[in-house]
Every structure is written in structure tokens, then in C-alpha cells.
Image (cartoon, grey):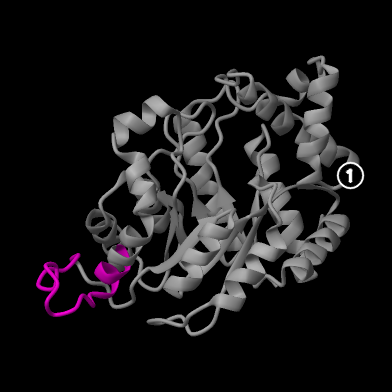
Amino acid sequence: MNLSILDQAPISSGKTAGEALQASIKLAQAGEAFGYKRYWIAEHHDFSGLSCSAPEVMLAAIGANTSNIRIGAGAILLPHYKPYKVAEVFNMLATLYPGRMDLGIGRAPGGSAEVTMALSNNFLQQVYKLPESVQELFQFLHHDFPDDHMYANISAAPLPTTPPQPWILGTSGKSAKLAADQGVAYAFGHFMSDNEGPEIVKSYVDHFKARRTLKKPQTIIAVSVVCAETTGKAEELATSSLLWKIQLGKGEGKEGVPSIEEAKNYTFTDEELTVTSKMKQKMIIGNPQDVKEQLMELQLIYAADEIMIVTITHSYEERIRSYELIANEYSGRKNL
């Protein structure tokens, strides 16, 4: 079973965005050392507690500080951008880091309504046109416009030896259909979906149309996980992330992911306890053995090719340790 990393580049309370981004580079390096297949970083804009607004910039830094782990965006929010520019950027990254580059495409705004207007004042129109934009992007990546197309004589240079692998990221039947129709790999956000995930992923597999380089469907399931030496410690670490999400829902959380001490001193209302209980149902929290068992069960339910883990803790060291414990449990290495 392949394991991968999804990084939202969280800022912990008392830390700066610069420290968070440096922690992301260290996480990618650690993931490579632990044997993870790929590392993706997400795109968010003016989002309290998250530091990465430009995955392409971070990928340049991460590629320069790693050697063989696949790296990519999870995801580039295409409705904000012209396909040609996205193709240029990721072709350049794929030229710098050959055979390692993934290009995940998403349709979410990644920020507030005001941020969306600042980025692109026709966002909703571009969401509606996303299938056409995706098609155009892939034609730029593979340099295969029809001869009579207006873009037939231009290229998204530099053209790498191995193009970046495209992925569609989503949580709905629409994203699954788009990925199947385009014949590209599909990543489903289990950690952020209330939909019938296994049915959506099965629909993608059943309707997949082979095109270009991908000859059969390929799936990733993204899961929120916190792992520690004991389940009790994992529950304690997860409390920080849960409180932060509660704060974000109330328009707070600007200070970043709270510490364990801050979480312990916070008095949850009955309504907030209900919300955190529902959030925990989508998470996997526990010791290495329990986490592995639950991940394997989820992989079977989805029939997924790969599990991508997103972990948010206040301590960047504990975050890396969580990934290490899981990797060791899967590989049979002894956890110390």
C-alpha cells in the first residue's frame, strides 16, 4: 500500500508563516526519508492559520531540498488562472525535477468571497467552464492541440522530457466524472467530505476513459490522521486541531493552531462538543497499530490505490513523528 503526504502548511500559535513554510520543507524531507511516495502542498488564500498561497513557489524550494519523492500541488485552483500559465509553471517545475512532478487541479475558491474577487472577478463563470479549462490545460501539457486550433503553434515552454502527471482533486460526483472523462488520476478528499465517498470513487473507476499516458484509473484517498505512541497521546494532540477548526468556524483562529495547553484550558460548549465529535468520525486518531488497521480498512472500502495523509498538530515535531510512526508500522520497522 502506497502512502503519501498532503500538507496544508499550518501555522501554529506563537509561530510565523516563515517558520511554518520551513517546517513544510522539513516535512517533505522527512517524508522522503520515511519512504512516502509523494508530497503535495495545498493552495489557500488569506486563510487564517495556513501559510501557502502559491504551491508552485514552495514546490521549487521543496524540489531543491529533496531527491526522489514525487512532489506536487494538492491542488492548483484552476478557476483563478489561465491554463497556459499553469502549464508553463508546471512544465518548468517538471523540467527542473524530472519524473517527480504532479499537478493536482481543484475547483474550490480557497478563500473568502473578497479574496476570490481579488484573484479573479469571474470565478463562478470559470467554475462553470472548468471542463473546458481542464481540457485546454492538458492539451498544453501534452502539446497536442489539433492542427487547426488557435494554440496549435505555441507551446508551454519549457517542454519537459516527462510531463507533470495531472490529477483531479474533489469531493463530489462532478469531480469524479471530470477525471473519468479526461482519463486522468483522481484524488478524493475523504477528510473534507460528507458525501458517499466510496460510491463516488467507484463511479470514477467504472466510467474511466483511457487517454494519453494513463491507461487505467488511479485513485488516492486523502485522510486526516493523528498518530502517536499511545492512543491517549494521539487524542491529546488531535485536540489542538479540533479546537482550531471550531475557531475557524466562528471566524476566529487567526493566531493559528492552538497548543495542547490552550486546548486543555478551553471550555467547549455542548454544541462545539457535538461538532468535534462529528469531525472525529472523519479522522483516524490512535497508536500506530490502530491507525494502520483503520487505514487498511478504509483502503479496502474505497478500493484505493494510495492513501494520502494530512496531519495537523501544534508541534511540527509531533507532526513529523506521526508520519514516522505510521511509515514504520507499514514497513515493519520497529517504532522506538
Q: Is residue 61 visible?
A: no
Q: Is residue 187 above or below residue 146?
A: above
Q: Is residue 103 above or below residue 122?
A: below
Asked if residue 278 is among those painted magenta in the image, a careful observer would answer no
Residue sitting at x 64%, y 45%: 192
Counting from the top left corner in percent of width and height, residue 268 is at: 81, 18
Judging by the rendered image, the residue that carries numbered circle 1 is 231
Asked if residue 155 is among those painted magenta in the image, a careful observer would answer yes
Counting from the top left corner in percent of width and height, residue 171 is at: 59, 53
> Dot 1 surroundings within 10 Å: few (below 14), some, or many (20 or more)?
some
Question: Where is the N terminus found, in terms of image quarters?
Answer: bottom right
Q: Is residue 101 above or below residue 222?
A: below
Res 104 quadrant in image? bottom left
Q: Is residue 58 left or right of residue 319?
A: left
Counting from the top left corner in percent of width and height, residue 4 is at: 61, 61
Residue sitting at x 28%, y 34%: 121
Nearer the observer, 224 or 205: 205
Nearer the observer, 85 or 228: 85
Helix or strand or loop: what does disc 1 sit on? helix
Nearer the observer, 213 or 263: 213
Q: Name the residue type under label 1.
A: Thr
Residue sitting at x 51%, y 57%: 169
Region rendered in magenta: 137-157
Nearer the observer, 286 or 96: 286
What secondary structure characterizes most of the magenta part?
Answer: loop
Q: Is residue 300 left or right of residue 109?
A: right
Res 239 quadrant in image? top right
Residue sitting at x 76%, y 38%: 279
Q: Is residue 42 left or right of residue 324?
A: left
